[in-house]
Image (tube, helix red, strand yellow):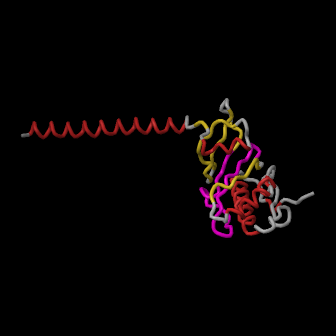
Amino acid sequence: MKKLRVLLIIWVIGLIFFYNCKTSDEKKEVHNQELVGITKITEDFDWIKNHYSNAEFISSGKYKDLNVFNIFDGSKKEIGILIFTAQNKLSGEGYSGEIDLGIIFDSDYKIIGVEVIDHTETRSYLENVKDSGYLKLFKDVSLKEELEFDMNIEAVTGATITSKGIFIGVKNLQNKLQLSVSQPPASNIKKK
């Protein structure tokens, strides 16, 4: 009976050891996937190429407390970052609800492009905003530049609330990224 107990204990210890080894291997595999987690840009992210024609790969990650996607060229050199406002709880409110934006920054944290990813706005109002070139007004805006609605970024006539919702999403993300890269807030920078 004593031998049976000893064998049973050895068998249980063996199972526990085997399980822990397998779990460690699985953890290493997941960690390695994160290290080489660069994937080819798929159809879902193809719009990135409208702003970065040489963009070929993306990789999800974290930049301090922001969820980001790093953007890479064909040689896997990082060329910018993509940040979604909704994923970081920074979306602006339009007439019918939140407007989720994808905002692309270059390595100097200048805006390369803004895309509307998801929304509940009336399609004609949003198309009016897009057709007016409103999203292009944010191109080349740096973290140091202070954005003011209806001052340096004007609303689109007939779609003021939709315009403001987009503006707020860009401004929220600009402020959050500015804090993350430890630059002084835009409101403290005096224009020359």
User: Residue 67, how many percent across, how many down?
Assistant: 60, 51
User: Residue 168, how many percent across, how many down?
Assistant: 72, 64
Quarter of the image with the N terminus in it: top left
The residue positioned farthest toward the top in the image shown: 75
The residue positioned farthest toward the right in the image shown: 192
User: Residue 124, how many percent across, how many down?
Assistant: 71, 63
The residue positioned farthest toward the front in the image shown: 124
What's the residue at 24%, 39% (across, down)? 13
What's the residue at 72%, 66% (across, down)? 162
Question: In this view of the protein, which residue sits in the foreground, 129 or 9?
Answer: 129
Question: In this view of the protein, which residue sits in the foreground, 162 or 26?
Answer: 162
**Vertical position of residue 3 compared to residue 95: above or below:** above
- Quadrant of residue 25 in the image? top left
Residue 79 on the magenta segment: no
- Quadrant of residue 149 in the image? bottom right
Quarter of the image with the C terminus in it: bottom right
**Vertical position of residue 19 compared to residue 67: above or below:** above
**Vertical position of residue 63 compared to residue 30: above or below:** below
**Vertical position of residue 73 compared to residue 122: above or below:** above
Residue 94 on the magenta segment: yes
- Quadrant of residue 122 in the image? bottom right
The residue positioned farthest toward the left in the image shown: 1
What's the residue at 22%, 40% (across, down)? 12
Question: In this view of the protein, which residue sits in the foreground, 64 or 153?
Answer: 153
Q: Which residues are magenta?
A: 81-108
User: Residue 140, how many percent across, how many down?
Assistant: 81, 49
